[in-house]
């Protein structure tokens, strides 16, 4: 085995070396390459921090320059500096009116007037007071200064007025027109200055004092108040009796009515409405009949009034099924049984009963959402039926102007 390997090695060497493989030129090229590699210097890695810093600075500079250019472009060419406007106030106010009024009977002194802002600017918040320049008046008032009412932080706009009024009692022995001459000064002021001040010279002195009656006059008055002759008392008694008699006549007693017209038949259970000969009848009563005729038909009324000057004369009969007033209401043209019926009205809850006689009346003259209007041209009677869902409201009256009912709801 060993001999075979040696032979093999020898055979391969002979074969591999039969042709030149590694020449001198190849050796020189390899050595030259090794020499160049050993002599080449190793370069350091480039530092990238500074270029990045310069790039960031350049980018910031571009932004700053752009902002500056845009800001200048948007500003007016003439605006070089923003200046705050100067705040200006009215330096003074102007007296518009003022006057003093003294009532001798009550000893009341009224101080009133108006000041105005005639400038183009608002005033500062101000206060107001009255200075008492006359020592006697100041002693009577117990002060040399009176405060006028001004709302907190109140100021006047251009052309805006401020009005004041002060009423005080002045207890002086002798008072006349000269007492308050150059005595009252009005001052309008701020924390730092006076806006206006003036002395009131328009003075009104009222001497309408109540004159106390003399002793003799007092006695006469007292005698007149306490003394009354028997004839005067008798006259008053007669007048009172007359009033009572009128009232008794206006509303007769139930007993008297029942003697004349029979027993009361109220409260009615139902009320019928019919149409006969161009006339509407409510329980057989129509417009134009007298109260006497109504009493004969309906019997004694339950209520009657002709004494209230603010209400019409009326008579009423109780109605069991009516809403609210629960009555058949007749308005009378004048007091007494000769007065004629000018209006009839009642309210009822009985829907079925009403619908029964409504169907018998036929087609209405006019019909709206909740109302039916029946009209007789010959008698000019208007029957109105209003359906309020909870109850019916029925009325009968004379009507000459039909245009009022033809208007839209």
Image (spheres, rainbow, N blue to C red):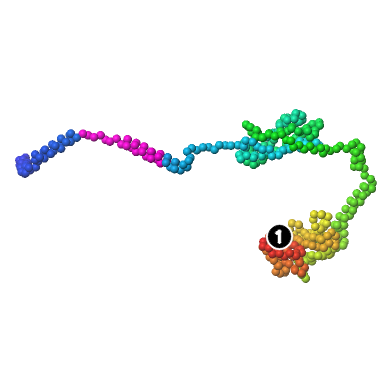
**Looking at the image, which is closer to me, 223 or 298?**
223
Q: Is residue 167 visible?
A: no
Decide whether residue 90 is among the magenta residues.
no
Left or right of residue 6: residue 402: right
**Looking at the image, which is closer to me, 356 or 329?**
329
Q: Is residue 140 visible?
A: yes
Hey, which quadrant is residue 281 in on the image? bottom right
Q: Which residues are magenta?
A: 41-67
Residues packed near mark 1 inside 10 Å, few (<14), some (14 to 19) or many (20 plus)? some
Hey, which quadrant is residue 228 in on the image? top right
Residue at figure coordinates x 71%, y 64% from the top left: 403
Residue at figure coordinates x 32%, y 35% from the top left: 50
Task: Establish if 307 lies above or below 174.
Answer: below
Q: Secondary structure at mark 1?
A: loop
Residue at figure coordinates x 38%, y 40% from the top left: 62
- Where in the figure is residue 117, as x and y percent of width and height? 64, 39
- Where in the figure is residue 366, as x and y percent of width and height? 69, 66
**Looking at the image, which is closer to me, 273 or 212?**
212
Residue under pointer 1: 391
Decide whether residue 57 is among the magenta residues.
yes
Hey, which quadrant is residue 311 in on the image? bottom right
Residue at figure coordinates x 88%, y 53% from the top left: 243
Judged by its main secondary structure, the magenta piece is helix
Image quadrant containing the N terminus: top left
Q: Farthest residue toward the right? A: 230
Q: Farthest residue toward the bottom? A: 277
- Where in the figure is residue 12, as x and y percent of width and height? 7, 43
Left or right of residue 87: residue 52: left
């Amino acid at each position: 085995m060993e001999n075979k390997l040696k032979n093999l090695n020898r055979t391969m060497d002979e074969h591999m070396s039969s042709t030149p493989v590694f020449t001198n030129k190849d050796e020189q090229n390899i050595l030259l390459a090794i020499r160049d590699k050993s002599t080449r210097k190793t370069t350091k890695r480039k530092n990238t921090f500074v270029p990045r810093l310069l790039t960031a600075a350049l980018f910031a500079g571009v932004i700053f320059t752009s902002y500056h250019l845009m800001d200048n472009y948007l500003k007016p060419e003439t605006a070089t500096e923003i200046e705050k406007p100067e705040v200006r106030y009215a330096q003074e106010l102007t007296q518009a009116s003022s006057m003093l009024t003294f009532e001798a009977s009550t000893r009341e002194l009224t101080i009133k007037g108006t000041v105005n802002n005639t400038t183009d600017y608002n005033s500062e918040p101000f206060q107001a007071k009255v200075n008492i320049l006359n020592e006697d008046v100041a002693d009577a008032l117990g002060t040399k200064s009176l405060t006028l009412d001004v709302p907190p932080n109140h100021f006047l706009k251009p052309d805006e007025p401020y009005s004041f009024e002060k009423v005080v009692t002045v207890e002086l022995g002798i008072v006349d027109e000269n007492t308050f001459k150059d005595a009252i000064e009005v001052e309008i002021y701020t924390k730092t200055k006076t806006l206006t001040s003036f002395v009131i010279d328009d003075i009104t002195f009222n001497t309408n004092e109540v004159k106390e009656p003399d002793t003799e006059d007092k006695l006469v008055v007292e005698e007149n108040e306490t003394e009354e002759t028997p004839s005067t008392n008798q006259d008053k008694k007669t007048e009172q009796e007359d009033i009572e008699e009128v009232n008794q006549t206006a509303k007769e007693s139930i007993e008297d009515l029942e003697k004349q017209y029979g027993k009361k038949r109220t409260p009615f259970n139902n009320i019928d409405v019919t149409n006969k000969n161009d006339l509407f009848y409510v329980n057989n009563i129509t417009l134009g009949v007298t109260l006497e005729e109504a009493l004969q038909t309906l019997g004694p009324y339950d209520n009657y009034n002709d004494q209230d000057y603010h209400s019409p004369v009326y008579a009423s009969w109780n109605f069991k099924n009516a809403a609210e007033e629960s009555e058949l209401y007749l308005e009378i043209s004048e007091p007494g049984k000769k007065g004629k019926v000018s209006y009839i009205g009642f309210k009822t809850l009985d829907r079925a009963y009403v619908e029964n006689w409504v169907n018998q009346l036929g087609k209405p003259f006019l019909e709206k959402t909740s109302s039916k209007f029946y009209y007789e041209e010959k008698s000019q009677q208007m029957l109105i039926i209003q359906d309020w869902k909870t109850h019916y409201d029925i009325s009968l009256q004379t009507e000459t102007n039909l245009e009022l009912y033809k208007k839209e709801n």
